[in-house]
Image (tube, rainbow, N blue to C red):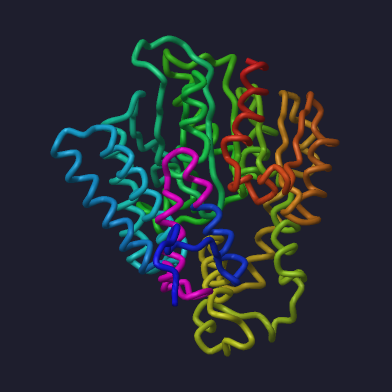
């Protein structure tokens, strides 16, 4: 006879697929600042086919729509706090669905725009200011959000935040931006060419190594504001953004503090750490293009790997896998690392592997200014890439350092 009384039908289990399991941890981690709920994340695992990206997209898109509908109903009834919380969850669920969608698929943009729209709705009920801007940059515009703890117009310390390959400005708010706002910082969220937010409006852009150029454009905007203390401007780079931020600060003296999470100084070496070999050196007859991927047997290249390879080639604007990794060689800080003289904070997790830890050490040894650092551990629940499993602790570590510095 079975038990007639139980604690729950929900069970704590993830995925055998390592990448999908990390994405689940990423989603669970966002519960710290209202980006998800534990129960919904665990329930959706039961409906997603392990290692099948299309299944992930379908289920998270359904969840996002359910959350948005609920938020709309609460907003109409004037339940401001509840509506804000539900809109933020919907925003992040749409982002999760966007992650596993090929960036050339029109659905990718649709999901990204829906995530952005839900975020804008949430901001109507925020306890801080919110401004959305599009900065002219060459022949495109760069998306930017500016937020301040108050409308009083006082000059404040300001934190600029840039993500990397697949993060979004909305996710940055849920990961660390809101935590910084509560500590009295102005926040500027922005994206450069090829990044997720920019792709929504300029799908033909791709990553560029000289990221000091978009950063300088954002700094021109920031320093032109009366509520930004130009002597207290910091730049935080998240994931690939660790490279973007480090490269920019090595050439842009208006940044007064750098936080690199992770401190990537050579993106090419960082990426071949995932592959296990250097595709830039592969024989030409083994090279492949995006249009070749459907013909490669799944036992040779699993479906999820095909999606990653295709996105990688497109996001770097290159015609083949080999040329993509050859182009990545330009994404290097090089000798300019020693030109970074402002205070720096380096962050990484011990679960990220050998190459990220090597670059972490090179960064700490190579900058000329004062440097603080933290290698997060599994015991702290923060050993993952960008500490997604314990965001509140990671934020406490770097924001307290920055607070004391400023």
Is residue 36 rendered magenta in the image? yes
Q: Looking at the picture, how far across and down is residue 366, in whole percent?
A: 83, 36
Q: Which quadrant: the N terminus?
A: bottom left
In the picture provided, is 128 more to the left or to the right than 375? left
Q: Quadrant of residue 257?
A: top right
In the picture provided, is 254 more to the left or to the right than 120? right
The extreme right residue here reads 365
User: Which of these two is toward me, 317 or 227?
Assistant: 227
Q: Looking at the picture, how far across and down is residue 260, in whole percent?
A: 67, 38
Q: Quadrant of residue 348?
A: top right
The extreme front residue here reads 1
**Residue that appears at 74% across and 51% down:** 266
User: Which of these two is toward me, 40 or 195?
Assistant: 40
Is residue 274 rendered magenta in the image? no
Q: Looking at the picture, how far across and down is residue 124, in whole percent?
A: 26, 32
**Residue that appears at 52% across and 58% down:** 24
**Residue that appears at 63% across and 36% down:** 394
In the picture provided, is 114 more to the left or to the right than 220? left
User: Which of these two is toward me, 256 or 32?
Assistant: 32
**Residue that appears at 33% across and 29% down:** 131
In magenta, the rendered stretch is 28-56
Q: Main secondary structure of the magenta part?
A: helix
In the picture provided, is 134 more to the left or to the right than 249? left
């Amino acid at each position: 006879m079975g038990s007639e009384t139980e604690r729950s039908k929900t069970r704590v289990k993830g995925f055998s697929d390592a990448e999908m399991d990390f994405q689940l941890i990423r989603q669970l981690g966002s519960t710290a600042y209202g980006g998800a709920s534990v129960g919904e994340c665990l329930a959706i695992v039961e409906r997603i086919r392990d290692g099948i990206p299309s299944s992930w997209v379908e289920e998270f898109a359904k969840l996002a729509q359910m959350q948005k509908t609920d938020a709309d109903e609460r907003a109409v009834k004037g339940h401001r706090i509840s509506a804000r919380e539900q809109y933020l969850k919907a925003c992040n669920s749409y982002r999760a669905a966007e992650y596993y969608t090929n960036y050339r698929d029109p659905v990718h943009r649709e999901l990204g725009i829906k995530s952005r729209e839900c975020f804008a709705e949430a901001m109507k009920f925020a306890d801080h200011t919110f401004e959305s801007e599009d900065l002219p940059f060459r022949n495109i515009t760069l998306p930017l959000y500016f937020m301040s703890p108050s409308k009083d117009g006082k000059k404040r310390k300001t934190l600029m935040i840039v993500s990397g390959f697949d993060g979004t400005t909305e996710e940055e708010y849920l990961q660390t931006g809101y935590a910084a706002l509560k500590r009295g910082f102005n926040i500027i969220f922005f994206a450069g060419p090829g990044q997720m937010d920019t792709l929504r409006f300029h799908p033909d852009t791709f990553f560029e190594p000289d990221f000091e150029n978009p950063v300088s454009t954002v700094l021109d905007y920031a320093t032109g504001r009366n509520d930004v203390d130009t002597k207290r401007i910091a730049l935080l780079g998240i994931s690939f953004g660790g490279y973007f931020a480090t490269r920019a600060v090595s050439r842009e003296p208006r940044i007064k503090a750098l936080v690199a999470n992770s401190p990537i100084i050579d993106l090419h070496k960082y990426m071949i750490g995932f592959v296990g070999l250097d595709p830039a050196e592969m024989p030409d007859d083994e090279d492949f293009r995006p249009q070749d991927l459907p013909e490669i047997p799944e036992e040779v290249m699993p479906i999820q790997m095909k999606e990653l390879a295709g996105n990688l080639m497109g996001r770097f604007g290159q015609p083949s896998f080999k040329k993509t990794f050859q182009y990545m060689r330009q994404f290097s800080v090089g000798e300019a690392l020693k030109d970074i003289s402002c205070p720096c904070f380096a962050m990484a997790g011990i679960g990220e592997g050998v190459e990220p830890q090597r670059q972490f050490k090179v960064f700490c040894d190579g900058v000329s200014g004062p440097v603080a650092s933290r290698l997060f551990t599994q015991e702290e629940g923060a050993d993952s890439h960008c500490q997604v499993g314990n965001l509140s602790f990671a934020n406490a570590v770097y924001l307290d350092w920055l607070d004391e510095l400023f």
